Structure formats: C-alpha cells, structure tokens
Image (tube, rainbow, N blue to C red):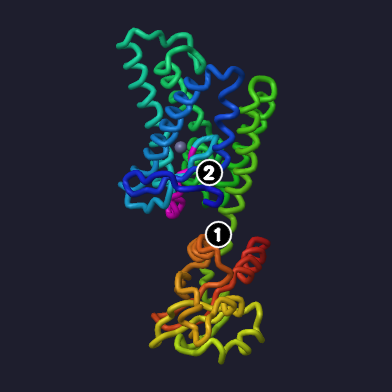
Amino acid sequence: MRGSVQIVRVAGIPVRLHWSMLALPLLAIGPGLSRLASSACFLAALFASVLAHELGHSLYARRRGLEVREIVLLPFGGISVIPRLEGSASDEMAVALVGPLTSCALALGLAALAWASGIALWPPTLLGRSLLARLAWANLLLGAFNLVPALPLDGGRVLRGLLARSADRVSATARAARVARALALVMILGGLLLDLWVALLGVVVLLAAGAEEHGAALSVACTGVRVRDVMVEDGHGLGADEPVAQVASFLGAFPGRSFPVVEGGRVVGIVCSADLGRAGPGATLADVADAGAPVLDAGAELFPDAVDQLLRSRRRALPVVSEGKLAGVLYRADVEAALRRLAQG
Ligand SMILES: [Zn+2]
C-alpha cells in the first residue's frame, strides 16, 4: 500500500505501517505529559492487538491456500491484503470471521488473566488504571466492532458472502454496500453526539463501501479482458547490445513511448528516451534499460492481476510476452482509459 513502510515480517508476511499512524499517539496522549508513558504502553499493546487480529485473518487465509501479500496497520485498524480472497464467497466469509474471533479469544484470555490477578473488569473501561482490564475490553470492542455488517468491515464481508449465495457478486456487493452506507450514517450521526472517532470511522466506512461497490462492478465489467487486448503490439523491441549513441535519436522521436530491450530472444528490460540521460560514453541499452520492470503475460487477465502489477511496479509501461516471446508494451495510460471505458459499460 502506498504511504506505508515495512516495520517487521511475521511468518513471512510483511507488516507495514501507514503514515497516518503517526497521528495516533498525538490523539491518544491527551492532556498531561505524565500519562505519556502509560498511554504509550497501552498504545503499543493496542497495536499488537490489531496485529493479532490481522494475523488471524492472514494465517487462516494462508491455511486455505491463499497468498497473503502484506498487512497494513492504520489508525482505524488493519488491512490484510489477500489478492485472491474475493474469488470465493466461502473463503471470504471464513477468513473475515477469523479476525473478530481472534480478537474475542484474546479478550477472553486477557480477562481470565485479569480475573486470576484479582483485577476488577467491571465496569467496562478503556481508560481505567489496569492495563490488563483496558486491553481485555479493547480487544472485545475490536472484535465486536468488526462484526458490524458494514462493508468493508469483517461483518460486511460475511453479509456479502451470505447475500452472494442467492445473487451474483455485483448485486450482493451493491446490497451489502447499501446496508453499509445506512450504518455509516448512523455512525456519523451517533458519533457526532457521542464520540468523534465513531463519526470519523463512519466517514471511512461510507467512502470504502462505495469503493467496494465500484471494484466489484469493475471486476465484472473486465471479465475476459486480457493484457493483449489493451497492450501496444511490439514484436521486435531493441537489442540490448545496441549502443545508446545509435538509438538516441530514434528514441527521442518517440518521447512518450517505451521499448522492450531484448537479448537472445529474451526480454531483459524496458527503455524510454528519458532513461538515456544517465548513459555514459560507449554505453549500450543493456546499461540504461530498466531491468527490474516486471514482465507481463499477454494472456493474463487485465483486472485485477495486470493492473495490480502495473500499479505496484510504479512504472508507466511494462513489457508483455506471449509464450516467452516479446509481444508488446502495456501502458498505464491505456489501462486507465480502458478501465474508465469498461466501468461506464
Ligand atoms: Zn478484521
């Protein structure tokens, strides 16, 4: 995810921190610097609780044979990025349920610990003196809150899965998003009266529900669209051993274009006129080409696979091969135009 940094790997899964987390300590410390230490302690523990919730999702998803790309921690909770999860309603429902179950189990464990240590758990508190009691309640809240059936919260994913049993995915998502919007409005109005955090969260749910709906509609509109349908064909590319001095004027004539660089029939990179600036005297294309660019397959689905790779690579264009041979170039601008067209139907 953009705007996040990796802080640790757990069981091989990168755990990333979103920059907006930096604002969290400022909000939670509140008045009085003397509370700083205990707040920091509580925040760190809260953070670990959110991570445990996400690890519940992620590790269970992996057990079901799904690839987990990363976990991103945000002030509102976490996101487990599991690319193939939405392919199956039963996978999505089961994986969605495990997160809140993990939080509730943690809450129970912490409550048992508190009880054994003679710490009072009642009345419920997130601000009381005992860290253990606060954490137990925080985890219960985390679990219960995520069960609210408002997409993209876990409860909303379960609801969508249930709706998808009797309808296609797009209409199931649309109905789940309607429920989410209604709940978001309740959260915003209630939050304005009770707690601004809840109102803010309502706004996040409102925006995210719309994005889920859009994403589901787009993935249906893109069904059957392959990389080759959107790429610009180029079966030749440029030779890796070509001297930069010789191809500079040719590349300069096509300022917006990228050309795959080929060596022995294999794509070894991609180059555009802007890359030539860093060429020393006597350099060849192999020296200046972007060799780290991922290579796409012409037969791959455009959405979400190729779109995802294109966005993650942060490049304007990627080379495309078909059965191992160079086939063309996929431009980001063309993909964006195609997605806009498809989304409009
Ligand atoms: Zn969750």
Q: Is residue 236 above or below residue 324?
A: below
**Is residue 84 one of those drawn in magenta?**
yes
Span highlighted in magenta in the image = 78-88
Q: Which mark is residue 266?
A: none
Query: Residue at horizontal 47%, vertical 88%?
Result: 239
| Residue lying at 61% horizontally and 28% vertically, measured from the top left | 198
**Mark 1 Cα-neighbour bin, 10 Å: few <14, some 14–19, many ≥20:** some
Residue 72 at x, y = what percent? 48, 44
Residue 345 to residue 18: above or below: below
Asked if the stretch drawn in magenta spans residue 222, the answer is: no
Disc number placed over residue 220 in the picture, else none: 1
Q: Nearer the viewer, residue 209 or 69?
A: 69
Question: Picture coordinates of residue 335 (x, y %)?
Answer: 60, 68
Disc 1 under 8 Å from ligand 1? The reply is: no
Q: Nearer the viewer, residue 80 or 221?
A: 80
**Quick one: SS at disc 2?**
strand
Q: Secondary structure at mark 1?
A: helix
> Mark 2 sits on what residue?
18
Q: Give the residue displayed 48% in from the left and 63% down from the top.
A: 305
Q: Quadrant of residue 58?
A: top left
Q: Tell me if I can see residue 235 in this picture.
A: no
- CB within 8 Å, label 2 to label 1: no
Identity of the residue drawn at 56% across and 47% down:
173
Cα separation, mark 2 vs mark 1, equals 30 Å
Give the percent coordinates (x, y) of residue 213.
Answer: 60, 49
Give residue 185's quadrant in the image: top right
Looking at the picture, which amino acid does disc 2 mark? Answer: His
Q: Quadrant of residue 241?
A: bottom left
In screen coordinates, is 306 left or right of 197?
left
The amino acid type, in three-letter code, at marker 1 is Val
